[in-house]
Image (cartoon, rainbow, N blue to C red):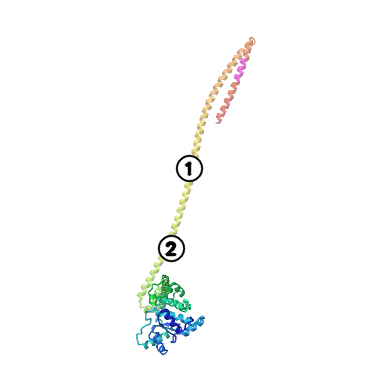
Amino acid sequence: MSEPNTAEIEAVLLAATGVRFHAVDFLPMDPTALGMSYGCIDLAAESDLRRAGRWDGRRPAVALNRGFITRLAAERGEHPNRLALAVSIHESAHALDSEPPYYTHPAGSGERQARITRLALTLRPSGIVTAGRPWAGHGPRWWRLLFHIAWRVERLTGIELPAAMLSLGRYELPPPAVIRRAFGSEPRRFRRLNIKEIKRAAYPRKFQRLWASAVRQHVAAETRRARNQRGTEMSTFFEQLKQRLGSRPDQFADLAKRVADGDAIEPAEAEAVLSTCGKSVDDLQREVEALREKQRLQNVVRNAADLEKQKASIERKLRLLSEKQERELERLAEKHLGQSDKLENELADVQRQLSEANAAKRRLQRAAAERHSELSREVRRAEHRANEAWQLAYECQGQAAEDAAYDRRHKRLKQDAKAARNEADRLGQELATAVERDAMA
Ligand SMILES: [Zn+2]
């Protein structure tokens, strides 16, 4: 099927939804609206429809703004009837989003309601069909009906209707194509259900999650906006308050401070301030005294703080000094103890060695003395024997001639004497050596 004209759109909508719609494209409309769905459009169009012989009682209707649709379609390189079809589906979903018979029963007479509806189409007052921010009437049920009707229309006409064309507004929601995907195969599976049944069915889980997340994001954004708004209001309030207070200085307090600081003030000026502020001289005096006392106390506190600092500094130095002294004493004591230990050990060692040496010396002296007396005895014995030998040799000398035996005996005795004499000499020598050695020990 080629792009349907307005009459053909009515047939397509009937086939897709089972509901007979008036598609009206002759009523004056808000130039910025592509189409509108409003409960009483049929009443607004009634007289024209009657003239054309098309009026057969009240029916839901969609209004199309042919002028704007044609302009926008040209801008987009789109066939105007295709865009008109998409707009009709969009608006029919709005009508079907309400309860049957999908149009509002007029409270007043037909003519009165018709006039109100004509006005509404021209002015597009917000909130007529688009209650509930930010999706403004484009809630879950509307999106579901939109994609169900579009799926059916695509099947009937063979005309592809992209999600973005079916809904040109964003309404702080995910892109229309994303929402359409969240319904998955539902339009095909529900192809035999009527509008009432579709509306009753539970939403696909994917769509539920998507919508919940969109709502959460919207609420978070709203909260942020509200907070920023409140913050701005509050800072503005304080800014204004500051300006007001700033422009009216406390003259009395200022005067008292100047007096307390010792400034020279004309009595006339002080009098003027007191009368302006409704204060007495006593008030001023009290205030000045209070200020001076405060200054004095502040000075005391400041001085006390300085003294505390000095005290802490001195204490710290003393502590460091005493710590240093203690460390020095400890170091000296350790050194001293170490040295005396060492010396005492050395002393003990020397004393031990000395006593050993003395003992050895005593032993040596004793041995030498013993040896000496023994040698002396032997010397004396040898000398005695030599003397005896010499005596005998001398006695025998005279008889030598007489007796050869005596002669031989004489020779032998002489030899003995000589040997004894040598022995005595040797022993004497040894004694001298021993005595000399002992003396040196
Ligand atoms: Zn809409």
Q: Tag 1: residue type?
A: Asp
> From the viewer's perspective, is residue 388 above or below residue 85?
above
> From the viewer's perspective, is residue 339 above or below residue 99?
above
Region in magenta: 412-421
Compare marks 1 and 2 and give the one earlier in the sequence: 2
> From the viewer's perspective, is residue 348 above or below residue 258?
above
**Residue 323 x, y percent position in the rendering:** 45, 53
Secondary structure, mark 2, is: helix
Say left or right for 343 vs 287: right
Was residue 416 drawn as part of the magenta stretch in this picture?
yes
Say left or right for 79 vs 198: right
Pick whichever, 206 or 314, lies toward us.
Answer: 206
**Residue 59 x, y percent position in the rendering:** 39, 84
**Residue 12 x, y percent position in the rendering:** 44, 81
| Badge number at residue 306 | 2
Q: Which residue is mark 1?
A: 341
**Residue 139 x, y percent position in the rendering:** 41, 76
Say left or right for 186 vs 396: left
Disc 1 residue: CB within 8 Å of ligand 1: no
Question: Residue lying furthest bottom in this view?
Answer: 51
Residue visible at 58% across and 27% down?
A: 433
| Res 342 seen here | yes
Secondary structure, mark 1, is: helix
Question: Residue lying furthest right in this view?
Answer: 401
Q: Tag 2: residue type?
A: Asp
Label 2 CA crowd tier, 10 Å (few <14, some 14–19, many 20+): few
Label 1 CA crowd tier, 10 Å (few <14, some 14–19, many 20+): few
Question: Which quadrant of the figure has residue 219?
Answer: bottom left
Query: Marks 1 and 2: which is nearer the front?
Result: 1
Question: Residue lying furthest top in this view?
Answer: 402
